[in-house]
Image (spheres, helix red, strand yellow):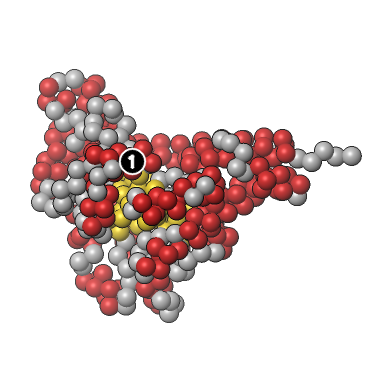
Amino acid sequence: MTDALKRLSEEGVAIWLDDLSRKRITSGNLAELIDQQHVVGVTTNPSIFQKAISQGDGYDQQLSDLAAREVTVEEAIRMITTADVRDAADILRPVFDATDGQDGRVSIEVDPRLAHNTKATVAEAKQLAWLVDRPNALIKIPATQAGIPAITEVIGLGISVNVTLIFSLERYRMVMDAYLAGLEKAKERGLDLSKIHSVASFFVSRVDTEIDKRLDGIGTDEARALKGKAALANARLAYEAYEEVFSSDRWAALDKAQANKQRPLWASTGVKDPAYKDTLYVDELVAPNTVNTMPEATLEATGDHGQITGNTIAGTYDEARAEIAAVEKLGIAYDDVVQLLEDEGVEKFEASWTDLLKSTEAELKRLAPSKG
């Protein structure tokens, strides 16, 4: 192992693990990653839980108990996933305390089937915060049109939020605006703003996957020369927007009230194209006050051969704008790409949730006590 993960942390990038399972908790692996690999947070999503519950027998005892109680499959899933998040939050509690609440966070997502229902999303977020019952939990809310007002309402109640599935710069600005509006509501209610935290999960690799596919379809040398550039350009321009919003007069008033900045979180940082360096979306997205949530393979690759050379975002904005413009000039519409990716993102999480329902239901039936 190199000291790349240590250097990354020193540059102001919080390293979070994009994975969780009961085995990772009970085996001591999560604690080991915190102690040895500079991991200071955990993110989850329906796909991660579906994989965890469908593999091995780590959940059999709890599933057996739930089956004996004849709970619904939805209740079973919530009992299982919140138990994992609660236990992970307890393991990360020393980090949470040491960083004054900045890190040591564990995220859990609202039911993705509610992504287009504001009221239901708010209700689910409140329920999850109550169920997990840990100050270092983050409730994940997707940045859909319906999710934006839900973010404001949930932050306004003093619940910390991880906004997920952000692909476009316009939507990211709406997310930051929703966060500030939520803080203003919380302030009006007399809540302690210093206790409210948020990250905005800006997705990276999927942008290259979709745009590269379209560039390949064009097939010219000019098009091929742009492959692997759009995702980094998009993320870097997101950081520019972050710097702008959190240096505004509106933010200054909240800053005086001890509010916390909503950090950009680089999500989907595992490289999808094997032609690219496996640490591309780590090495090239280094800037202060950010989070990079990595699948374990990316974490290990960064520790082994990541090249952390300091801030790789500062001074890149003009070049990033030019790269996005060059892609658009070839007939690839940025707005079309990011909307497609958001729609696909919600659909993928809904599909994972459906798979999770099916596999959990099958396990409940398998472990149900025989009657008679």
Q: Position of residue 111 (x, y in %)?
A: 53, 48
**Disc 1: which residue:** 300
Query: In the figure, is residue 316 to the left or right of 13?
Result: left
353 displayed left or right of 44: right
Looking at the rendered structure, the kind of residue marked 1 is Glu
Q: Is residue 137 left or right of residue 4?
A: right
Is residue 241 shown to the viewer in this render? no
Q: Please tell me which residue is depicted at 48% across the width and 58% down the height of the picture.
A: 91
Is residue 108 at least partly visible in the picture? yes
Q: Is residue 308 above or below residue 279?
A: below
Where's residue 147, x and y in %? 43, 53
Image quarter hosting the C terminus:
top right
Q: Quadrant of residue 167?
A: top left
Say which quadrant the N terminus sits in. top left
Q: Residue at x 41, y 39 (%)?
A: 345
The residue carrying pointer 1 sits among few (fewer than 14), some (14 to 19) or many (20 or more) residues within 10 Å by Cα, namely some
Task: Please tell me which residue lies in front, 159 or 43.
Answer: 43
Residue 16 vs residue 112, the one in the foreground: 16
Q: Residue furthest right?
A: 372
Question: What is the x, y in percent for residue 108?
Answer: 48, 52
| Place of residue 17 in the rendered image (x, y in percent of width and height, measured from the top left) | 39, 48
- Total numbered labels: 1
Q: Secondary structure at mark 1?
A: helix
Residue sitting at 38 percent across and 55 percent down?
Answer: 35
Q: Residue at x 40, y 71 (%)?
A: 195
